[in-house]
Amino acid sequence: MAHVKLSETHDYDLVYDDQDIRGWEVRDGAGAVVGKVDDMIVDTDREIVDIVRLENGQELAARDLGEVRVYNEVGQVTRRVDIDDDDHAEFRTHYGTTFADTGNDYDYYEPAYNFGYQQARSNTYAQHDFDSAETGLRTDYGTQYPTGNYDDHRDAIRFGFDRYQSRRGDMPSQNLNQTKI
């Protein structure tokens, strides 16, 4: 198994620019700062980002990032690293058919798609459908995104939630933890 730093190769690119989390802050599930992402290590045999290296030298297996949140420079959770690229493609397609005419770009809705998807995976909501989970989701969304507008993002949250619910039997869970390149 060969590994190479993403910053030192021109042979590999991320599928989407927003998958590049270098320079972003990483926190554990309790919100404690773990470090800042220095580089992403590519497993060239499997063609995935396998390891995330922090500025402090610590390395985290990408498959273990399910409970680690990545924050952008303004401290907002913008993405968690464990969503399959097929799902991101579906999110973008849904955005194009549902929100493209709203005047807001995809980046405005992406955190909502990710939030819905992640919540469907959580122990809290895994056994619920969206309708039965919605009251709790609204509360949790307000806590995680205090400046976000749940009503504006509701359809994206629901799509992300339903997307995971529809796929959870199709896909081994470890595949959700890999960012393919």
Image (tube, rainbow, N blue to C red):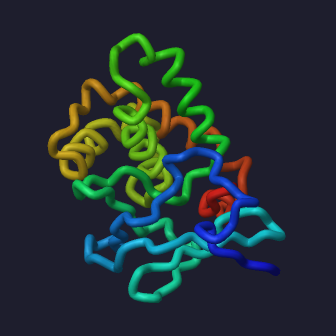
Where is 9 relative to 80, above or below? Answer: below
Look at the picture and state if 51 lies above or below 153: below
Residue farthest to the left, as pictured: 146
In the depicted structure, whether residue 174 falls above or below residue 131: below
Q: Residue at x 57, y 37 (%)?
A: 163
Q: How many marks?
A: 0
Quarter holding residue 67: bottom left
In this rendered view, identify the residue nearer to me: 112 or 37.
37
Q: Is residue 58 above or below residue 177?
A: below
* Residue farthest along the top direction in this orientation: 101
In-front residue for pair 154/11: 11
Q: Can I make out residue 119 in this image?
A: yes
Residue 84 pos. (x, y %)? 62, 50
Residue drawn 55% across the image and 30% down it: 92
Residue at image coords 69%, 49% = 169
Q: Position of residue 36 (x, y in %)?
A: 37, 74
**What percent of the width, then of the height, locates residue 24?**
37, 64
Q: Quick check: can you spot residue 157?
A: no
Q: Position of residue 15 (x, y in %)?
A: 65, 47
Q: Quadrant of the C terminus?
A: bottom right
* Quadrant (top left, top right, bottom left, bottom right) of the N terminus: bottom right
* Viewer-nearest residue: 168 or 155: 155
- Image quarter for residue 178? bottom right
* Residue at 47 percent of width and 16 percent of height: 98
Horizontal relation, residue 139 to residue 61: left or right = left
